[in-house]
Image (cartoon, coloured by chain):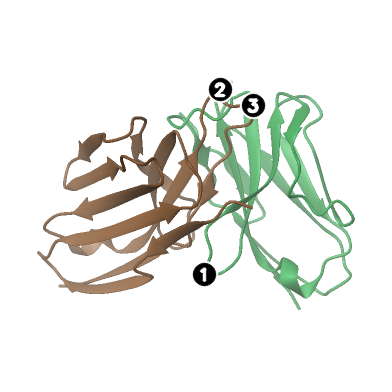
Chain colours: A brown, B green
Amino acid sequence: GQQLNQSPQSMFIQEGEDVSMNCTSSSIFNTWLWYKQEPGEGPVLLIALYKAGELTSNGRLTAQFGITRKDSFLNISASIPSDVGIYFCAGQNYGGSQGNLIFGKGTKLSVKP
Amino acid sequence: EAGVAQSPRYKIIEKRQSVAFWCNPISGHATLYWYQQILGQGPKLLIQFQNNGVVDDSQLPKDRFSAERLKGVDSTLKIQPAKLEDSAVYLCASSPRQGAPYGYTFGSGTRLTVV
């Protein structure tokens, strides 16, 4: 089946630093999504991208939909302790017959105050 | 707006036993999904319902897993008999339209441990 390669697997950073993570796929998607999951909770949508080349921001978060439609990245600027969690990318072919999400394995972010 | 409700939150069973999970989606959401999330992995879709009909169950291990959404509202996922490798968090999600990213909301999950 389809697989997403997400990197890095984990990051340990100092508060105030910027963070970058990315996701690549062997298949094309028409939608890329970024989620955050905290312990004991389900994933929460951060940003959705619908168009190749699209750059979208949500507060300190910025994500881009790669021009090949096979990759995406997420940047977090000026990290704070509450950014701690696992970040997942997900690809979707929204508008298709199913539209289910294909998730990466996640990037675990730790922020040292 | 109430979120996606799941129960129980935790379950520990012995292998070969049966277990059932329950999900109540957001009111009015036509589409309901069950995902399996193994430790250290991203969620993987098991089954998708549109109202009370199955849209996609291609990744559901049908020899031991079953799911139903009889009245197009809440849903149950059952495992019978359970294996050690079924230890995972089972997430339910719902969306107002099939696949729509916004409004696609996950519950907190049921953590299953098979011993």
User: Does dot 1 land on a helix, a strand or a loop?
Assistant: loop
Q: Chain of mark 2?
A: B
Mark 3 vs mark 1, foreground winner is 3
In the rendered image, residues at marks 2 and 3 fall on the same chain? no
Q: Residue furthest front?
A: A68
What chain is tagged by disc 3? A
Which of disc 2 and disc 1 is earlier in sequence? 1
| Quarter holding residue B111 | bottom right
Q: Residues within 10 Å of mark 2 (few under 14, many from 20)?
A: some
Q: Quadrant of residue B98?
A: top right
Label 2 secondary element: loop
Image quadrant of residue A110? bottom left
Q: Which mark is residue A97?
A: 3
Give me the chain letter of mark 1. B
Q: Which residue is disc 2 drawn over?
A: B97
Neighbor class of circle 3 (other Cα within 10 Å; few <14, some 14-19, many 20+) is: few
Name the residue rendered at 63%, 31% in the picture.
A98
Q: What amino acid does circle 2 point to?
A: Arg
Residue A102 image point, x, y percent = 54, 47
Q: Position of residue B102 (x, y in %)?
A: 42, 30
Q: Amino acid at mark 3?
A: Ser
Picture residue at 13% right of the left edge, 68% below the top: A15
Residue drawn 90% across and 55% down? B63
Secondary element at image label 3: loop
Q: In the picture provided, is B21 more to the left or to the right than A37?
A: right
- Whole-percent x, y for residue A6 in the image: 41, 61
Query: In this view of the protein, which residue sits in the foreground, A86 or A53?
Result: A53
Does the image show residue B12? no
Crowd class of label 1 (few under 14; some 14 to 19; many from 20; radius 10 Å): few
Q: Is residue A56 above or below residue A13?
A: above
- Residue B40, label in figure: 1
> In whole angstroms, how far apart are the C-alphas of marks 1 and 2?
29 Å
